[in-house]
Amino acid sequence: QIPYIRVDYISNNWTEPELRKILKENFLSNKNVTDIRVIDRLLVKGQMDFVETAEIWRQAHNAALFDRSMDTYKQKPKHFLERFYEGHH
């Protein structure tokens, strides 16, 4: 399905090897999950994401969220010193 996904979301300019790498990274990000219920939930969510992408129900900017390197969300500092250094007293 990756060649079709690449054609459907060509505005992102991803190559097939890049898409395969992104898919593998997303899959391996959960390699330490051992709870069967969580694994089942992740499988169902992955299947739904795959169908949404393959059927072009997903918008191109949402497809870009698969690539974690494009994620611009910055985590808030958790420790007092980190907050202090950033000016969040």
Image: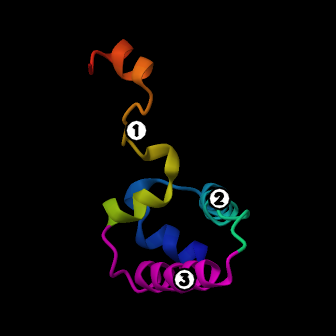
Give the CA separation, mark 1 to mark 3.
Answer: 25 Å
- Reading the image, the residue beneath label 2 is 29
Assign the C terminus to one quadrant of the image. Answer: top left
51, above or below 9, in the image = below
- Reading the image, the residue beneath label 3 is 41
Task: Give the residues drawn in magenta, as a range.
Answer: 35-59
Give yes or no for residue 52 being in the magenta stretch. Answer: yes
Left or right: residue 62 compared with residue 31: left
Assign the N terminus to one quadrant of the image. Answer: bottom right
Identify the residue at horizontal 33%, vertical 82% (top origin): 57
- How many marks the image carries: the answer is 3
Q: Relative to the observer, which residue lies in front, 3 or 66?
A: 66
Identify the residue at horizontal 72%, vertical 73% (top origin): 34
- Reading the image, the residue beneath label 1 is 75
Left or right: residue 10 compared with residue 25: left
Give yes or no for residue 49 being in the magenta stretch. Answer: yes
Q: What element carries label 1?
A: loop
